[in-house]
């Protein structure tokens, strides 16, 4: 979840846009999967003659693609809905739709509570958007929150929104069968299903032809990717899929997210090792370092098992970066449990972490079974300790890179200056370096740099070749 992208609005720059007489505006919240879904939604609406706008006031349709993962995410959307109420008053006939996880979780409650919502559409129902819009245009409330066992939108080619033209997300599976007790996702995104490998390969190949140089394969649990070809009966697992994509072209980098520690296999690790263009970076959510808490979370591993997995990754790929998701203050968590979390963080020396305070979600196993009994002040203090430890670990990891040489894929100008390039190394670290005229580089190029300095979030370097 990229905090800087929450609520981002999109506009695609299609040449034909001016001729389209209806426009939609979309804001996206939540995980990369949701941002990727917005690109599918844009493709479906575009097919119906809708152009995009970044200005909600000139839109005929306003969509919020929402997230339910924590209460705060839902509150932000509610606030936005009341703001859009004003636009709607000024422009009668404008339709407002809530899409995504919050639509799925709250269903018709959204229509009853928020009188300004005209459409409620769950993550598996985007194909029906054209009919739903028609229905809403007649003044009736349009709802489709049916979850599917098959839908992967495999045949819909997403329009790349807000793209840098170099890196793209490709969805390979949807839904989740892990019942982590804190998590709303199995309820909002339904059962796990994988997309056929041929359409994934085709999308990645096409992206490469268009000049993209990095694909991130997305799924709630990519390691349980599993596709059986209906004709040949051939099985494709995640390691095989990775290999097929890596073979498209050595200049196409492959990343993936998210892995469940219980599912990432040695076969995947060896495939990663075998191909230079499969990036040496694994997002391996920890959630808690305490075996007792992990059990309550239904994570199906112990602290020892997780540590052994980390050791295995580093044994096979000593240069592999690892990041985590960590939750502070889950039900019954005591000081010792918290210390156990800090200890695993030290052990792994995560390059990066996404850190959260536990937020009880209605309907989840934890909400039903356990009491959310860690006081807010304690949750906040533990989160602060986790964040501060992570800051130190990130800085230490970056300091170790000073003096090293890396291959970097240039993504564009650095945030601070048009005289500097910004790119990433295989480990997903952001590297910034001065442009040098003699090299005549452009985004999408691979260059070799030597790291000269760092902060906790960035490596600074000089280009060698
Ligand atoms: N409260 C806090 N964090 C949560 N996450 C999922 N559900 C909750 C919750 N109820 C975090 C987990 C997950 C990430 C996407 O969000 O760490 O891996
Ligand atoms: Fe939010 Fe999870 Fe839905 Fe992504 S899948 S939008 S993180 S609730």
Image (tube, rainbow, N blue to C red):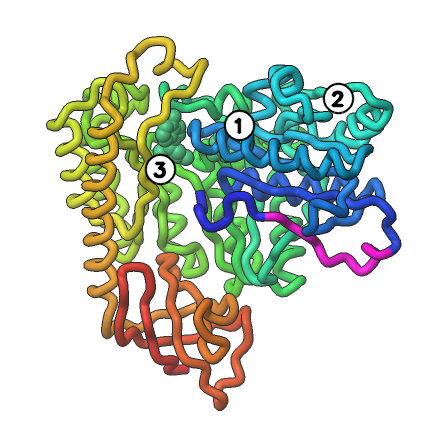
- Whether 210 is drawn above or below 6: the answer is below
Badge 2 density bin: few <14, some 14–19, many ≥20, Cα 10 Å: many
Up-down: is 191 above or below 15? above
Q: How many marks?
A: 3
Q: Quadrant of the C terminus?
A: bottom left
Check the picture and name the quadrant holding the N terminus. top left
* Residues shaded magenta: 9-18
Q: Confirm whether residue 415 shows in the render.
A: yes
Q: CA distance from mark 3 to mark 1?
A: 20 Å
Tell me, yes or no, whether the two marked residues, 3 and 1, touch with CB atoms within 8 Å: no
Rendered residue at 73%/25% (across/down): 118
Q: Is residue 198 left or right of residue 78?
A: right
Disc 3 packing (10 Å; few <14; some 14–19; many ≥20):
some
Q: Which residue is mark 2?
A: 142
Q: Secondary structure at mark 3?
A: loop
* Vertical arrangement, residue 123 with respect to residue 254, above or below: above
| 3 or 2: tag closer to the N-terminus | 2
Where residue 383 sits in the image (x, y, percent)? Answer: 24, 37
Residue 175: give its label.
1
Q: Nearer the viewer, mark 2 or mark 1?
A: 2
| Labels 2 & 1 near each other (Cβ < 8 A) | no
Residue 219 location in percent, x, y? 50, 37
The answer to which image quadrant residue 190 occupies is: top right
């Amino acid at each position: 979840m990229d905090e800087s992208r929450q609520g981002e609005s999109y506009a695609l720059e299609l040449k034909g846009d001016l001729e389209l007489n209806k426009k939609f505006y979309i804001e996206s919240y939540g995980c990369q999967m949701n941002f990727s879904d917005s690109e599918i939604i844009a493709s479906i609406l575009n097919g119906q003659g809708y152009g995009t706008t970044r200005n909600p006031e000139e839109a005929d349709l306003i969509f919020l693609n929402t997230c339910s993962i924590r209460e705060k995410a839902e509150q932000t959307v509610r606030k936005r809905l009341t703001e859009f109420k004003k636009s709607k008053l000024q422009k009668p006939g404008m339709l407002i739709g809530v899409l995504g996880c919050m639509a799925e979780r709250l269903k018709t409650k959204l229509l009853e509570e928020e009188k300004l919502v005209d459409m409620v559409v769950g993550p598996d129902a985007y194909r029906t958007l054209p009919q739903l819009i028609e229905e809403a245009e007649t003044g009736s409330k349009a709802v489709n929150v049916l979850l599917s066992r098959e839908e992967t939108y495999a045949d819909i080619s997403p329009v790349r929104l807000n793209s840098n033209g170099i890196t793209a997300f490709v969805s390979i599976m949807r839904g989740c069968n892990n019942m982590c007790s804190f998590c709303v996702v199995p309820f909002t995104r339904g059962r796990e299903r994988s997309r056929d490998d041929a359409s994934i390969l085709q999308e990645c190949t096409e992206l490469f032809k268009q000049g993209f140089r990095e694909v991130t394969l997305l799924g709630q649990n990519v390691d349980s990717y599993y596709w059986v070809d209906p004709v040949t009966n051939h099985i494709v697992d995640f390691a095989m899929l990775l290999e097929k994509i890596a073979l498209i072209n050595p200049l196409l980098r492959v990343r993936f997210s998210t892995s469940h520690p219980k599912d990432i296999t040695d076969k995947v690790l060896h495939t990663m090792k075998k191909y230079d263009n499969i990036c040496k970076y694994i997002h391996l959510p920890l959630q808690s370092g305490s075996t007792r808490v992990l059990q309550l979370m239904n994570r199906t591993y112990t602290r020892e098992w997780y540590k052994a997995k980390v050791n295995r990754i580093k044994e096979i790929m000593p240069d592999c970066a690892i990041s985590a998701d960590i939750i502070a203050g889950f039900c019954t968590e005591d000081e010792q449990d918290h210390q156990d979390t800090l200890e695993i963080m030290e052990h792994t020396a995560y390059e990066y972490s996404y850190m959260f305070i536990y937020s009880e979600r209605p309907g989840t196993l934890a909400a039903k079974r356990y009491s959310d009994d860690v006081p807010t002040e304690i949750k906040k203090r533990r989160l602060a300790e986790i964040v501060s430890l992570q800051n130190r670990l990130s800085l230490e990891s970056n300091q170790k890179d000073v003096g090293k040489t890396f291959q970097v894929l240039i993504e564009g100008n650095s945030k601070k200056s048009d005289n500097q390039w910004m790119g990433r190394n295989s480990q997903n670290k952001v590297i910034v370096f001065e442009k040098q005229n003699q090299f005549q580089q452009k985004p999408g190029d691979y260059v070799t740099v030597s790291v000269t300095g760092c902060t906790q979030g960035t490596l600074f370097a000089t280009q060698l070749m």
